[in-house]
Image (cartoon, helix red, strand yellow):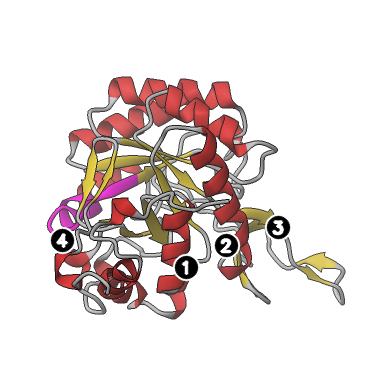
Amino acid sequence: MTQSTTTVDLTTTLGRLLLPNPILVASGTFGYAREMENVIDVSRLGGVLPKTITAEPRVGNAPWRTVETSAGLLNAIGLDNDGIDAFLEHHLPYLRTIGAPIVVSVAGRTEDEFVGLAARVAEHGADAVELNLSCPNVSGGIDFGINAESCRKVVAAARKACSAPILAKLTPNVTKIAEVAKGAADGGADAVCLINTVLAMAIDWRRQKPVLGNGMGGLSGPAIKPIALRCVHQVRSSVDVPIIGIGGISNIDDVMQFLVAGASAVQIGTANYYDPTVSTRLIDELPVALSELNATSVKEVVGSLTI
């Protein structure tokens, strides 16, 4: 007989970061939460990651910026955003009122930019900072996420300057992702986020040109879930650091697969576009799924995969 779902503990701990449940929404897929406040009860979410912020405003890449593929979404937005000053003035004050933990995603061109961005958003009340070390759609976007030592250095510098928990979002476009994850862990990351999008492209053969204005972009959605699960398992097996799983999650089976593989939490990304209520529905379904494994908490099933 399964445990009563009323006794299931959904709280999740990621280093210094305590979340009410393991269901977060991924940066770039949820706007600044204002866009979703009339669609779902955003206060129920385990965490909200608004669009990645950079030091200066960015107009992003030339169109086309998105294209659907047979099993996912290909994008090359190019970190289009209004910059840190506008974010701190117009968006973060609102985000702090919604009742869910706020994890601010930041991207820098240099180590100093990452450090400065992390420190500023922490000073203004962000619950945690996600270092986007892995965007494939901008020049230099993955430089800090493809080398373990570079990753360690930028995480360590941000950790030293920033009082908030630090999450490192890593790219799958490397040979050995566990080595980069170890670099993040050695630098003091509270957790690593696996994975960012997979470098890919779409081609219009009649025009003999790429569909995306940037030529290549990042593939997300169901197509990358097996890759993401592999990365989570590899990191869980070799590095002692909490993991947030990302990649093609759209139903409760997907969530449970990531938890069993070793993720302590997940981020919902592409699914928000075609099913904006998915995140809160997964929170509702999670206790029943956990009870099927006779688990009374999320942590009991994390990393329970046997091979």
For the residue marked with disc 3, what is the amino acid? Answer: Ala
Depth-wise, is mark 1 or mark 4 nearer the camera?
Answer: 1
Q: Range of the magenta residues?
A: 90-104
Residue 225 is tagged as 2
Measured Cα–Cα span from mark 1 to mark 4: 27 Å
Q: Could you say whether the residue bearing mark 4 is in a helix, strand or loop?
A: loop
Q: Place residue 223 in its image quadrant.
A: bottom right
Give the residue number, with chain letter if any, for mark 1: 254
- Residue 110 visible, this angle: no
Residue at horizontal 25%, vertical 67%? 34
Depth-wise, is mark 2 or mark 3 nearer the camera?
Answer: 2
Pick whichever of labels 1 and 4 is earlier in the sequence.
4
- Locate residue 34 relative to residue 279 in the image: left or right: left
> How packed is label 2: few (under 14 Cα within 10 Å), some, or many (20 or more)?
many
For the residue marked with disc 4, what is the amino acid? Answer: Ile
| Label 4–label 2 contact, CB within 8 A | no
| Label 1–label 4 contact, CB within 8 A | no
